Image (tube, coloured by chain):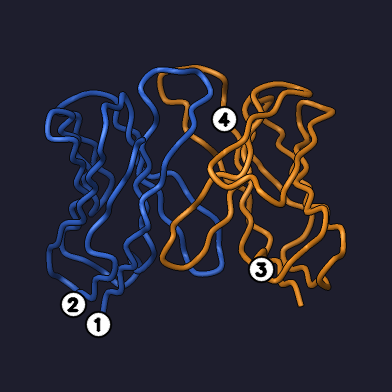
Chain colours: A orange, B blue
Amino acid sequence: DVKVTQSSRYLVKRTGEKVFLECVQDMDHENMFWYRQDPGLGLRLIYFSYDVKMKEKGDIPEGYSVSREKKERFSLILESASTNQTSMYLCASSRLAGAYNEQFFGPGTRLTVL
Amino acid sequence: ELKVEQNPLFLSMQEGKNYTIYCNYSTTSDRLYWYRQDPGKSLESLFVLLSNGAVKQEGRLMASLDTKARLSTLHITAAVHDLSATYFCAVGGAGGATNKLIFGTGTLLAVQP
């Protein structure tokens, strides 16, 4: 059974704190993604990675950074959390190539920044 | 720039009725996905459509793809309460191995008894 896990389901942080969101997949997927989900805006891509230590910016990278030191783990970092980063954060993974190449999603982390 | 539009954004249906959710996208793409999200849960893959004219069916849901019209539909037949969820379509960029997806804003489906 394929699995993507995220370190926390709910997180409350204060403005200015450094926040780490962790994602682990057990499917040996090359691609990993971080999205944020906000009502009425759908899912927006923050960053993605197609290999260890490789990363590319998505559509809304400002205020975020990422780290991928191991194939199975992809971390999202909020260097200095702000209230406008309150959101649901979803991690996903997929194979590098293939006919279907669908993304598999983790359960999400609901982050509140006070 | 690839844009994906879904409509309607909200759909309230009675059990037993049929309805269709539409997904339009703006540039050429070689793959389209439908996902379901239950309240408080993550996204679950429903269908992957890879070619013009592709049709996939699972239970009361049927998805189709018209790449010439840049349109995919998700048809619901004889809706039941268990189908209440938010449905997203997502479009992959033409070619490319990284499989970046652009998501629609989602359609919140509420099936009333």
Instruction: Say which chain tag 2 marks.
Output: B
- Looking at the image, can residue A2 be seen? no
Disc 2 packing (10 Å; few <14; some 14–19; many ≥20): some
Q: Residues within 10 Å of mark 4 (few under 14, many from 20)?
A: many
Q: Nearer the viewer, mark 3 or mark 1?
A: 3
- Distance, label 1 to label 4, CA atoms, is 37 Å
Q: Mark 3 and mark 1, same subunit?
A: no
Would you say the residues marked 2 and 1 are in contact, meaning their CB atoms lie under 8 Å apart?
Answer: yes
Disc 3 is placed on an element classified as loop
Residue holding disc 3? A86
Q: Residue type at mark 2? A: Gln
Q: Residue at x 58, y 55 (%)?
A: A36
Chain of the residue where label 3 is placed in the rendered structure: A
Point out the residue furthest to the right here. Answer: A17
Question: Sequence order check: which comes first, mark 4 or mark 3?
Answer: 3
- Residue at (76%, 31%) from the top-left corner? A72
For the N terminus of chain B, the quadrant is top left
Q: Which residue is mark 2?
A: B14
The answer for which chain carries disc 4 is A
Answer yes or no: do the residues labelled 4 and 3 have beta carbons within 8 Å? no
- Quadrant of the frame with the C terminus of chain B: bottom left
In this figure, which residue is indicated by the disc labeled 4?
A94
- Which amino acid lies under the numbered mark 4 shown in the image of this protein? Ser
- The reply to whether label 2 and label 4 mark residues of one chain is no
